[in-house]
Amino acid sequence: MPFGSLKLHPDLLRGVKELGFVRPTPIQADAIPPAVAGRDVLACAMTGSGKTAAFLLPVLNRLLTRPRGTTRALVVTPTRELAAQVLKELEDLAVHTPITAAAVFGGVGMGPQEHAFRSGVDVLVATPGRLLDHLKRPYAKLDRIEFLVLDEADRMLDMGFLPDIRRLLRYLPRKRQTLFFSATMPDPIRILTQEMLHDPATINLDRKAAPAVGITQAVYPVPQELKSRLLLELLRRGIMREALVFTRTKHRANRLWEFLGKQGISVARIHGNRSQGQRTEALEGFKTGRYRVLVATDIAARGIDVEALGHVVNFDVPAASEDYIHRVGRTARAELTGEAFTLAAPDEASELRSIERAIGKPLLRVTLPDFDYDAKPTAKLEVPRGQRIAEIRARRNAERARSKAKAERAAVATAPAPPRRGRRRRRPR
C-alpha cells in the first residue's frame, strides 16, 4: 500500500516523499484511515514502529481544512525529549503547509511558550506538568481543541502523570477527536481509555509486546564489577561503532560517564539531574557523532530518536520487561537493523529470565574472546549508598562551617569600634 492511497493532502504527501517514506508501516496503514475519517483511535504501538507519523499525519490532514489562528490540536507526551522529537517530525511532515507548532515542557523559560499560547499556534506538543503550569495563567486557553493525542500513555502511568492527565482533561472540550497510543495496556490505562474515547478504532490491542524484528539481541554474562571494562573492550575492538548505554540509576550513569571519559572515549550523559540545555547538547552531540557514547537512564528510553543507531547496551538489566523492549527499541527503527547487548551479572539472573519469558524466547549468551573475566577491578563503579550519603553530609557540614566562619569574619570586620575611654585627670594635691 503506497502513502498515496491514504487520502492525505498533497502537501503532506510531498513532505512524506521528501523524507524518503515510500509505503506506510503497519501501524500507519491501520491507524491513519480511521483517524482521517474522524474516528477516535486506540492503538498498541511500540517505539520504532512509525507511530508518530501514524497520529501526526491524520491530525495535520484535518487541520488543513480548519480556520487558523487558534490552537486546535494538542499532543501530550511523558518526557521533554519525546516532545522535542514529535515537534521535529511534525515540522518535517508539514514543511509544505502553513501549519505552525510549538513545544511546551519544563527546564526552559516559559516566555516563548507563553507567546505560542497567545499567538495561537496550530499544534502544541506538551508534557503534562509544564502544560498545567501554563493553564494556571489567564493567557493559556485550550477551549478550542479539536484533536487530542496521548503518546506513550503507559509511560505516563509509570511516571505518575495519570492524575495530571485527568486534571488536564477538564480544560478541554468534551467534543473532540482523541488518538490514544500506548505500548502496553495495564488496567489503569484501559480505564482511562474508557473515560476518554468514544467508539474507537482499536489496533493491535492483543499483540504481544516484543522488540522490533530487525534487532539482533545478545547477552554478555559478566561480573558486576567488570561491566565497565567489558563495555570499554567492546568499544575499543570496534564491535560497536557507537552506542546508547542505559544504566539503572543517575549515579551509575555519572560514574560510567566519568570512567569512559578517562579512557579517552568521547561520551555524554543524559538523566533527570541534567538541565534541559545539557540534555539537548548531549543528544545533539550524539546524533552528529561528536560523542561516540551516550549514557542514559530510562528517562531517555522513549525519547531518543537517532537515525540508523547501530547499538543499544543495557549496562544494567532492566527490572521490567517493558523497559527492556523500549530501551532496545532505540535501534532498528523504521524497519532498519541494529544490535542490542545486555551486560548481565549473576545477581541479575531473575530479571533476565523475566525478559526472556516476556519476549517468548531465550537470548543468545556471548563471551568476548581474550577478555579476562577473572580480573580484579581497580575501583568499584557503584559507591555504596550509605557512603555517598555520608560524603554528601560531610561536604555540606564543611560548607556550613566555611560559611559560618566567613560570616563571623565579616561581622568582626564591620563591627563598630568600641568607644575610647578618656584619661582621668588627677586632682591637684
Image (tube, rainbow, N blue to C red):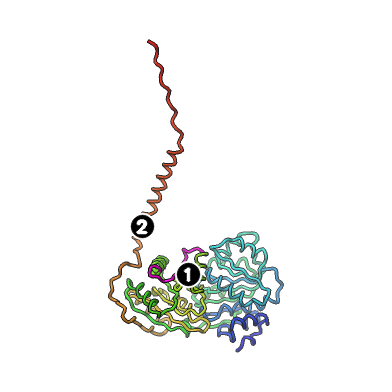
Amino acid under label 1?
Ile
| Residue 120 shows in the view | yes
Q: Nearer the viewer, residue 361 or 169?
A: 361
Amino acid under label 2?
Glu
On the image, the x and y values in percent for residue 171 come to 62, 66
On the image, the x and y values in percent for residue 205 come to 52, 82
1 vs 2, front mark: 2
| Residue 154 shows in the view | no
The residue lying at 53 percent from left, 74 percent from top is 152
The tag on residue 299 is 1
Q: Nearer the viewer, residue 318 or 263?
A: 263
Read off the magenta span: 261-276
Q: Report if residue 342 lies within the magenta region.
A: no
Q: Nearer the viewer, residue 407 or 239?
A: 239
The residue lying at 38 percent from left, 51 percent from top is 398
Q: Is residue 3 left or right of residue 377?
A: right
Name the residue beneath numbered marker 2: 391
Quadrant of res 295:
bottom left
